[in-house]
Amino acid sequence: MAAAGAAGAEEASGAAVTLRRIKASDTVGLREKVMWPGRPELCSLPEDEVPEAVHLGAFAGEALVGVLSLFLPKEGVKGRAQYRKVAVDQDWQGKGVGSALVRAAVEAAQSAGAAAIYCHARAAKTEFYERLGFARKGEPFEKYGGHQYVEMERDL
């Protein structure tokens, strides 16, 4: 998937999902449902609206089943891209939707000329990111009221 967000179909463990760009506001409902029930203030941030932000949605038919937000380096800067707030509907977890979203983010970051891509992964989910070629960077840290996170990075 290019940084511009061309639609594309991904095979997610036998279930076809279509990945496409969405608006930042389209990510909030699924994030609240999956990641922070009853905490909508954690589901969007002011930087979600910066020009370098790319929000991706995974669709099964018309149903939004996964989201990811990617923040590319400013044009002409060979920096690191960051993705965050990956959320996949519980009925679709374990079916390759999250992997498809992360692969699309990696491809978009490469196309944009980023030197690396990283995320702050929940400590319990680091194996998922390691399977996708990411490595742990630094020590675990706490945010969002006690959740443990680890920075995961992949050179591009």
Image (tube, helix red, strand yellow):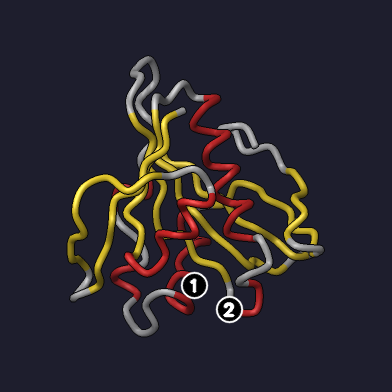
Q: Residue at x 70, y 69 (%)?
A: 63
Q: Quadrant of residue 42?
A: bottom left
Q: Quadrant of the N terminus?
A: top right
| Horizontal relation, residue 122 to residue 10: left or right | left
Mark 2 or 1, nearer chain start? 1
Please report the residue visible at 68 percent of the width from the left and 67 percent of the height from the top.
95
The residue indicated by pointer 1 is 29
From the viewer's side, name the closer residue of 129 and 10: 129
**In the rendered image of this protein, does residue 124 appear above or below residue 116?**
below
Direction from residue 22 to residue 25 in the image, left or right? left
Helix, strand or loop status at disc 1: helix
> Callout 1: 10 Å neighbours few (<14), some, many (20+)?
some
Q: Which labelled disc corresponds to residue 101?
A: none
Q: Residues within 10 Å of mark 2 (few under 14, many from 20)?
A: few
Instruction: Name which residue lies at 36% across and 58% down.
Output: 121
x, y percentage for residue 114? 42, 25
The amino acid type found where label 1 is placed reads: Gly
7 sits left or right of 142 in the view: right
Q: Nearer the viewer, residue 54 or 144?
A: 144
Q: Is residue 65 above or below residue 4?
A: below
Question: Could you tell me residue 128's position as x and y percent?
Answer: 49, 59
Residue 52 appears in the figure:
no
- Viewer-nearest of discs 2 and 1: 2
**What residue would you read off at disc 2?**
90
> Residue, x 66% and y 60% (percent of image)?
96
Q: Is residue 80 visible?
A: yes
The mark tally for this picture is 2
Across and down, in percent, residue 117 comes to: 40, 37
- How far apart are labels 2 and 1 at the CA level? 13 Å
* Label 2: which secondary element: helix
Label 2 is placed on what type of residue?
Answer: Gln
* Residue reaching furthest to the bottom: 38
